[in-house]
Every structure is written in C-alpha cells, then in structure tokens.
Image (cartoon, helix red, strand yellow):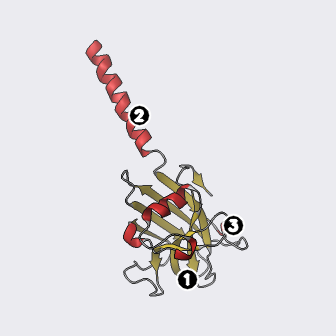
Amino acid sequence: MKKYIFLVSALVLVIVGLVVSQGFKRFNVGLSGYEETPLALSTTGTGEFTARLSNDESSIDYELSYSDLEGSIQQAHIHFGSVSQSGGISVFLCTNLGNSPGTQPCPAPPATIIGTITAANVIGPGSQGIAATQFDELVRAMRARSTYVNVHTSLHPTGEIRSQIDLNDERQHH
C-alpha cells in the first residue's frame, strides 16, 4: 500500500511539474480588425496565432491561421509595439512582397502557416532597442505585452487583422 501511495504521489508530482513547466510558455490569440491602429477596422478577416516558447527559451514554434480577409494577403509579422501602438517589425512570419529573403510565402486564405522563430529570425527593430538576433529581448517584450501579430493585405497595407501577444497569459484573446 505504501508503495502504491508513493507511486501515485510521484506520478502526481511529475504531472504537476509538467504543467508548471509548460505554464506561461504557450499562448493563443485571436486576430481581428478591432485591434488595428491607429484606428480599429471593421473587416470580415479573422485569424489565430498559436505558439509555444521552448523550455530553454531559444525558439518559438508557431502556427498562424487567417481567413475571410478583404484584401489579398501581402505579409504577416510580429511587431514591437504596445496596445494601440504601431511598432517596427521584429520577425517576418510570411511575405509575398520579396522583402525578406528566405521567408515563406503567404498562401491565399483560408490558410495556415507554421514555423519556428530563433535568434536568426529576429531583425529588430533596432531603432526601438531590439537588435537583430536579440531573441531574448523579443521574449522579454512578449512577456511585457509589447508585441503583436499583424496580417497585412492589399486593401489594408498597414494591417487588416492584429492581436497583442501576451506570453504570460494562456487565455485566448478575441
């Protein structure tokens, strides 16, 4: 009986440890035009950004889905900017403009792209204090809720759908 209780207790500790170690490392946000800046945008476009920060905090695996965009997809990024602020590009997620060699193309909606972000993918913005390859600074900005995902289209080149990233919050935002 003692052995059984010990095994069950050990299993519970392992499960709790896994849950805690995964906490604050996964996030999922819904994208809409209502978070666009400088003015909210009424659009049929929607999206979702799901990501997981690796346990050693050296990479982020992500999935970006979007649909019902009113314009043709041009590009998608992670920007460095607080709520209701526009900011510079930190990471390209996809582009159809040829402005980031090696970046995957953005498929026509409805679509889902997947990828991994590492230090090599961080391009800045240097003018805002994040130098190229400073992955740790990007993660710090994500924890401070100072980054956002933005999908840009031909009809809305400054962005059609957007959402703040909050690495500390596992709830889904819409």
Q: Is 173 displayed left or right of 18 in the figure?
A: right
Q: Name the residue under label 2.
A: 16
Q: Residue at x 61, y 73 (%)?
A: 87
Q: Residue at x 59, y 58 (%)?
A: 145
Of the numbered discs 1 and 2, the one sitting upstream in the chain is 2
As measured in the structure, the alpha-carbon distance from the residue carrying label 1 to the one carrying label 2 is 45 Å
As measured in the structure, the alpha-carbon distance from the residue carrying label 2 to the one carrying label 3 is 37 Å
Residue 67 at x, y percent in the picture: 54, 70
Dots 2, 3 in contact, CB < 8 A: no
Q: Nearer the viewer, residue 1 or 122?
A: 122
Q: Mark 1 points at which residue?
A: 72
Q: Which amino acid does label 2 sit on?
A: Val
The image quarter in which residue 159 lies: bottom right
Q: Residue at x 51, y 58 (%)?
A: 140
Q: What residue type is labelled 1?
A: Ser
As measured in the structure, the alpha-carbon distance from the residue carrying label 3 to the one carrying label 1 is 24 Å
**Counting other residues with Cα less than 10 Å from the Cα at mark 2, is it few (<14), some (14-19), or many (20 or more)?**
few
Residue 174 at x, y percent in the picture: 63, 58
Secondary structure under tag 2 reads: helix
Q: Name the residue under label 3.
A: 84
**Counting other residues with Cα less than 10 Å from the Cα at mark 1, is it few (<14), some (14-19), or many (20 or more)?**
some
Dots 3, 1 in contact, CB < 8 A: no
Q: In this view, does 2 lie above or below 102?
A: above
> Residue 88 — which label?
none
